[in-house]
Image (cartoon, helix red, strand yellow):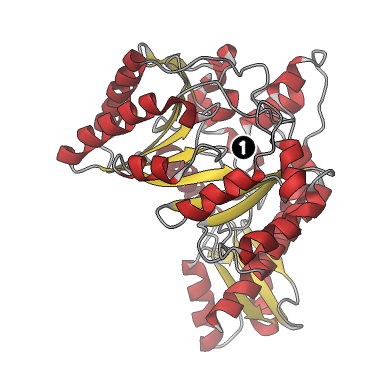
Amino acid sequence: MTRSKYTLFVENYPDRGKHLFFCTRTQAMVVVDDDLMAAIEELPQFSGGKSTADALTTLSGMGFLVQNEAEEEANITRYFQALKSDNTRIDATVLTTYACNFACTYCVEEGVKAAVHMDEQTAVRTVAYIGDRVQEHNAEKLFVSFYGGEPLLNLKAMRIVAGGLQEYCKPRGVEFSFGITTNGALLTPAVVEDLLGFGLKGVKVTLDGFGPHHDRKRPFADGRGSFDRIVENVYHAVEKIDVDVGGNFDHENIDSFPRLLDHLKELGLAEKLHRVRFNPISETPRDRASMPDNSEMTCIYGETSTAERLVELRRLALERGFPVDPGVGVNACAMTANSAVFTIDPTGKIFKCPAFVGHGEFAAGSIATGETGGGAAAGEASAQQLWRRCSDCPYVPLCGEGCQFGSYLRYGDISRLNCRKDFIEHMVRENLKLNYRFRQNKSG
């Protein structure tokens, strides 16, 4: 028996002589003392007593220890096979429109936004396509994420797709629900009440800091501020559905996020929101397209300073009683190589990653032809094995082969390795501490 390569120690935490032990493959977390840590470091030699032997057996069952290299290889291979081929649930993203009623200063879809709406015929065909995927995979659950543009600008298509899939799933015993990624301005109580009948489970809205800071980043198309409207809609929506609040930051608005959290808490939303999560404002495909060939773009997710800000915002949220994403802030992506995960744009084109929508060269087919394996899905079979180039890294279960969208932005090549090890190391280490600290506070 020996220590798995996919394990990490945070030494002398939570106290001197105690060590936080974490398995990146199983995401199990335990605290071990000096004696047990010494026994682990001595493996495969072992000279301890029965209690230590029993503890090592327990750690083995949690993924911290393996019998040999062959078991390690089998474990990690099964892990990625499950990630890429779990078809028990279909996750479909549907864009009802490329239009938007906001003029965000950093829009990831700048150059793509247009008055293009999913028409009734395409909506009906979308229902049929998704239904066929449910049947093909014999899926037990179907979750649809409506996206845009601003998806609530085309409620008709949303009702057709959600209603059609609800009717399809019910007699087949398939669990159906949907969510919406929306700017929140049109998420009125009347709209929420209407969509509940179609299977609405939750929404994600964005608040880029407090008040005027948000308004400068995310104004209406006519220049008006949107903060107060969104907060009012969120205040009512949390009584009916799950509401996630996201936020995007840069040096201009980062300092206003504590005030945002305080404001939401004052409104009684800390206990009512489903989750809060903040992210840095990143580069866009338009930025990449404007660069010379073979040039390298700085990756915001590769900078330790970004990790520090993300951890700090997570800490501030936890201290105020807000729910946050579970885990350690890094997750391998199953989108690009899993046929049960796909995105359909307003015209019926299929993309494997929603970040590429509107860029036709990355389309992987259409609802008329099915997935053809083109665009960002090219080499899908080999994409399932890209993690092997990083198989000796303890973080590979968390980041996989990395993000193809990030690789494209940084290098202009979706298959290029975009290693973010320094970023991930900081995120994992500090978030493990937060997870332990607040789990202990909660249990206490």
- The relative height of residue 367 versus residue 138 in the rendered view (above or below) is above
171 lies above or below 348? below
Residue 134 or residue 241, whichever sits in front: 241
Question: Does residue 71 appear in this view?
Answer: no
For the residue carrying disc 1, how many other residues have a C-alpha within 10 Å: few (<14), some (14-19), or many (20+)? many
Percent position of residue 374, x then y: 51, 14
Residue 332 spot, x, y in % from top left:
57, 44
Please identify the residue farthest to the left as the structure is shown.
171
User: Is 162 left or right of 167, judged from the image as shown?
Assistant: right
Q: Quadrant of residue 383?
A: top right
Name the residue tied to disc 1.
401
Q: Is residue 339 left or right of residue 435?
A: left
- Residue 24: percent from the left, percent from the top? 59, 57
Callout 1 amino acid: Glu
Q: Residue, x 46% and y 51% (percent of image)? A: 237
Looking at the image, which is closer to me, 65 or 302?
302
Residue in the image at 67% along x and 60% along y? 263
State whether residue 37 appears in this view.
Answer: yes
Q: Is 374 rendered above or below residue 212?
A: above
What residue lies at 38% left-to-right and 15% top-to-bottom? 119
Residue 57 on image: x %, y % = 49, 74
- Element class at badge 1: loop
